[in-house]
Amino acid sequence: MEPIISYSGLELNLAEIILGAALMVLGALIAYIAKPTQNKFLASKISDMSQAQLDMSAQQAQLQGRLSQMSEQAAAREAQFRESLDMRLDKVGERVGRSISETQERNNVNLKQLHERLALIDRAQKNIETLSGEVSGLQNLLSNKQARGAFGEKQMQDLIETYLPPNGYSFQHTLSNGKRVDALIHLPGDHGDVAIDSKFPLESWQRFTQADNSPEQSMAAKAFARDVMVHINAIEQKYLIFGETHDIALLFLPSEAIYAELHTNFSDVIDKSFAKKVMIVSPTTFMATLHTMRAVMKDAAMREQAHIIQREVGIIAADMTRLDARVEKLQSHFKQTAKDVDDIRTSSKKIISRSGKIGQLDLGPDSEPDVSNIAEFSAKRS
């Protein structure tokens, strides 16, 4: 049972209050019996206590009503709180579910993109592996001097075969001095043949580039320039033959980097090559040179065929003259035919006119033929 009175930490419920009141009444009766002189006073006290007990009972009933009302309000608030809590939990659950669904969709998209990127990475990795193998093969190729020379010569031959006609060049041609040149371009007329030799000074160039900003750089630069000049002097001595080859020979460098290095930092080597009439070309500049040579060959071929063209033009002119005479003759036939047609139409008109006159003659039974008209008609007819 819940306490009704609480005072200074002392709590009393309804049963304890009633028991206390009963004990007080019993004590009063005992005192009344023991002391008859105080009956009036005790009776008054008992009456007051009875009234207080009645008031306390009314307060207790009122208090129980309030407690019942408070209990109902508490139950209503609890129900409202539960309902509100359920609604909030539902909303939270809905948001959490939607968030989980969106997160799952994003994860699926990200996983798909990740798979695609991984596939691209795999392909790139395979390409890198293939490229690494090719680079390794190229390094092995370039590390061998003989293989490196064959590589440069093959690149030069591919360019020549691409841009020049088959009769415009020859490979590994032996000159009159017994020297064999890598390629010989046959220029038309008395220009002579252009000798081309392929060289690849890779080791000295690598030593020069690897010695960047070091004390050995000057020595490496001199060694690189010396190696290039050795090739230039060899081409001048072997392939520039008066009356047989062109007065300029070509040194083919299969590396754009080495070609650019020479023109950037070794202008003295370029000047000496010009003085010795040995032109240094890279794959790019060699293509431009081949284009020029092909234009020269085409122009010479056109000049060689000029007499054939002139003869064909003369034949065409004679054919045109004969054609013009035949057209003129045909035109005269057309004119004569037109005149004959006009004469035929004139005769047909006369016949039609005279036929009409004959149709207009009166040939009744009482009429006699007009001999004069018939005679006149016969005279006109004749």
Image (spheres, rainbow, N blue to C red):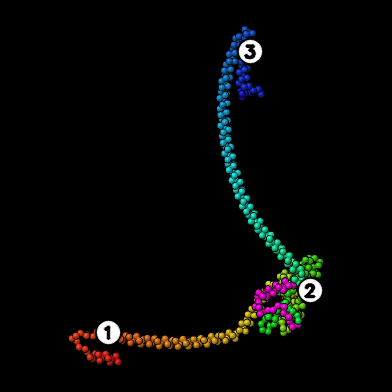
Query: Can residue 36 be seen here?
Result: yes
Q: Is residue 133 above or below residue 318?
A: above
Query: Can residue 201 be seen here?
Result: no
Name the residue type under label 1: Gly
Q: Main secondary structure of the magenta part?
A: helix
Residue 266 included in the magenta stretch of the image: no
First in sequence: mark 1 or mark 3? 3
Q: Position of residue 247 (x, y in %)?
A: 72, 81
Name the residue type under label 2: Arg
Disc 1: which residue: 356
Residue 152 included in the magenta stretch of the image: yes
Crowd band around label 1 with a 10 angstrom C-alpha radius: few (<14), some (14–19), many (20+)? few
Q: Secondary structure at mark 1?
A: helix
- The magenta segment: 149-177
Crowd band around label 3 with a 10 angstrom C-alpha radius: few (<14), some (14–19), many (20+)? few
Q: Secondary structure at mark 3?
A: helix
First in sequence: mark 3 or mark 2? 3
Q: Secondary structure at mark 2?
A: helix
Identified at 42% across, 87% down, the residue is 333
Res. 226 mark: 2
Instruction: Give the quadrant of the C terminus.
Output: bottom left
